[in-house]
Image: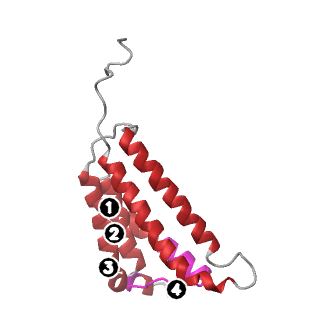
Amino acid sequence: MSLDHPETSTEKRRPDWAAFAIAAVLAVIAAVIFFDVARVKGTAGYSQVGPATVPEWIAFGLIGLAIWTAIEGFRGDFPKRDRQEFGPVVWVVAGLAAQMLLLKTAGFSIATGVLFALVAAGFGRRRLWLTVPVGIAFCLAIWLIFAGLLQLSLPAGPLERLFL
């Protein structure tokens, strides 16, 4: 036994359950795509290539990835992952939820500015008194470009109505 490899031959890594969960999700996504492809398959017309061809190949690719992931999960070949910190995830999810709740009433700039600030807090920038107004200013500039110059429709709130 060398010092380079501390594991002995009897010591094996256990199966990686997270890899099995990922493989299952990939297989479910592939099954949904196959189901949708089966409904569209008859519209190919005279050619063998139709609207179902590319989604079908994507589903085959996902099945291949699911099998490969499951095999690697059995082998335990995935590198050891760092411990998941849930605090930053909660900040980001809170930002997404706040944007969805505020978008219709407060408008694009305020809702997306709050999202910006909460995601920044998730990445460690906890000064909300600074990141909220900076985020709103950035998002107002984006709204002005999209709504004013590009003539695209983004939800307008009280702040955007000042510039209409």
Say which residue label 4 marks: 153
Whether 71 is drawn above or below 23: the answer is above
Residue 147 located left or right of residue 118: right
Q: Nearer the viewer, residue 98 or 93?
A: 93
How far is the residue under mark 3 from the one under mark 2?
10 Å
Can you tell which quarter of the image residue 61 is in? Answer: bottom right
Mark closest to the chain's N terminus, 3 or 4: 3
x and y percentages locating residue 4 in the rendered image: 39, 15
Whether 156 is drawn above or below 12: the answer is below
Residue type at mark 4: give it. Ser
Q: Which residue range is magenta in the image?
A: 140-159
Give the colour scheme of this rendering.
Answer: secondary structure
Say which residue label 3 marks: 102
**Does residue 71 show up?**
yes
Say which residue label 2 marks: 96
> Do callouts 4 and 2 mark residues in contact (Cβ within 8 Å)?
no
Q: Nearer the viewer, mark 1 or mark 3?
A: 1
x and y percentages locating residue 144 in the rendered image: 53, 77
Residue type at mark 3: give it. Leu
